Image (tube, rainbow, N blue to C red):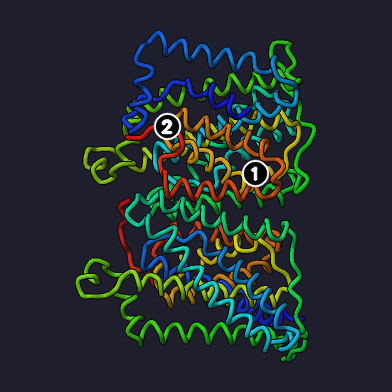
Amino acid sequence: MADDAASRRRRDPAPSRPNTGVAQLLAVFDDPRKFWLAIAVVLVAVAVAPLLFGQYATVILTNALLYVVLCLGLNIVVGYAGLLDLGYAAFFAVGAYAVAILGQQTALGFWAAIPFALVAAAAAGVIIGGPTLRLRSDYLAIVTLGFGEIVRFSARNLEITGAASGISGIEQPSLFGWHIDSPTEFYYVFALLSVFAVIASVRLANSRLGRAWLYVRHDEDAAEAMGIDRVRVKLAAYVIGSIYGAIGGIFFAVNLGAISPESFSFEQSVLILMAVILGGMGKIPGVILGAFIIVLGPELLRDLGELRLLVFAVGLLLIMLFRPSGIWPSRKS
Amino acid sequence: MSLTDILMQQLVNGLVLGSFYALVALGYTMIFGVIKLLNFAHGDVYMVGGFVGFGVLSAVGGTLGADWGGIAVAMFLSMIAMGCLGVVIERVAYHPMLAAPRLSILITALAVSLVLQNSVLTLTDGQITAFRTDLGFGGLEIGHVFITYNQMVLVGTAALLMIALETFVSRTQYGRAMRAVSIDKDMCRLMGIDVAKVIAITFFIGSALAAAAGTMAGAYYGSIWYFMGFLIGLKAFTAAVIGGIGSIPGAMAGGLILGLLEAFGTQIPGIGSEWKDVFSFSILILVLVFKPTGLFGKSETERM
């Protein structure tokens, strides 16, 4: 199934960013008719997947699509802006908990709660990023790690977050009388979110801000000399990334109906980061592929039991040593 | 117990905790000094050190006894083994990356950490291993404050190791080379210093100190598990930052300060032991925001 997913994803549009490999990959899409045909094929494949596979596969694929959203969000922070964030699960948690708490404590509906959850995540991004983005990059990494743990410990200790057992009975949303409750329906919700996430990522990469990220990542001094406010640009990446995370968290919470602090552990942050790096930082098709590998890989390697995490860890190390730009695209100049 | 007694008791607890933090923080700060890398795997070297110490003690405990004599042997062998592991990690994972962008080497360090963690996870099935020793719980009672002999030995050993390190760094040729490398690598090369060797020695010493802490912590708390390096890695980093990263006396002071802050912090109403970790991480973030150079650090501007 991973192969299937991979081959479907392989026809995804590549971002038009001047990276080695991506440019070559783009050559495949030189013909605009082929390009749109490829996108159409991917979209049709995503649309019919739940009809072809059973319910179990649909649930797994839903999870993969959730990771696509999360990984694209982290990709903005790590891949675009070049900031190492080791506590990304914190934003995922803020989104999930905000919606769960607002649903329980207030009469706001699910949809009305979303803006609050997004503002909460963005505020968390500003609070943690604002003062620390000026610091050394490795300080930032450890601060984000500490922040991720603070969020998890707080969720585990606070009453309002349901302490260690978390919050259960989160109501499933309905939209214009359509009650979203079956796995297939949630699959389509996540498919839609992923599509939006991809479009937003492509648009961001090609925007003025996207170019600023590219400069800051490659040469901070030069970027600053050209009048780019590096702290503001980094903060923008951080906040946009946190909003992606929160969106993932919001729908994760209503999909599962229950959340607990352990869903937002350091391991979660690492898995998301691994997916981004495995696929190739900064490259949208690579990141999507990475998300699918991270979710489908353990399903395929189920027999390995606890070894699979080790397999992933060794894989990550080997990729960093021998193929730092990720496994996708496979052709390198 | 009066308030003074409680505070005195916490002072003792804080010193013990601080000794562990300081030993691990020293490795962070030394490695940071020579290659400007935040070695994420350092906490895991501490953890593996605990397991190796446990393994040695299980092997020799029968003949030497599992009290401080046996533990000293276990600690010594674990220090040597982890020192070598540190050198291997540097050679295999970090050395090829030294010229790469900072983000790549940070992720590599994270990957090494995950490999160590998951190797032990696989070997132990993620179970907590009981670290059995014959250490008693005897001690001295001074007023209402009770200090166990274990705590005394532990703090004493940590102090000895730190004095030895300080002597090595300030009095020997290699110590001088280490300080020189942390200031200017290229100039050291021109002066005929074998920079690669100095880096290897630094990794050896830093990792050995972490192994000493890991073995002692295992013996002291009576259990070890694959994830125990994570929190202490984070806290030791906090300690190193409090003291000023790159500064050896800073790491010692920072470790003790953090240990004491934690011990006293848990006595503040509202901060129970469940908030202890949040408390330390908040200190980390506050120090980084308001005084990123720490107590003994030099200010420097970084360019990625």
Q: Quadrant of residue A204?
A: top left
Is B269 on the left-hand or right-hand side of A36? right
- Residue B21 position (above or below residue B74): above
Marked residue chain, label 2: A
Q: Mark 1 or mark 2, which is nearer to you?
A: 2
For label 2, the residue is A329
Q: Nearer the viewer, residue B90 or B27?
A: B90
For label 1, the residue is A264
Gap between marks 1 and 2, in whole Å? 30 Å
Is B59 on the left-hand or right-hand side of B280? right
Q: Residue at x 53, y 67 (%)?
A: B236
Label 2 crowd bin: few (<14), some (14–19), many (20+), radius 10 Å: many
Q: Residue at x 43, y 63 (%)?
A: B90
**Residue closest to the far left:** B190
Marked residue chain, label 1: A
Helix, strand, or loop for circle 1? helix
Q: Position of residue A130 (x, y in %)?
A: 44, 45
Quick check: marks 1 and 2 in contact, CB under 8 Å? no
Helix, strand, or loop for circle 2? loop
Q: Residue at x 63, y 85 (%)?
A: B72
One can see residue A333 in this view: yes
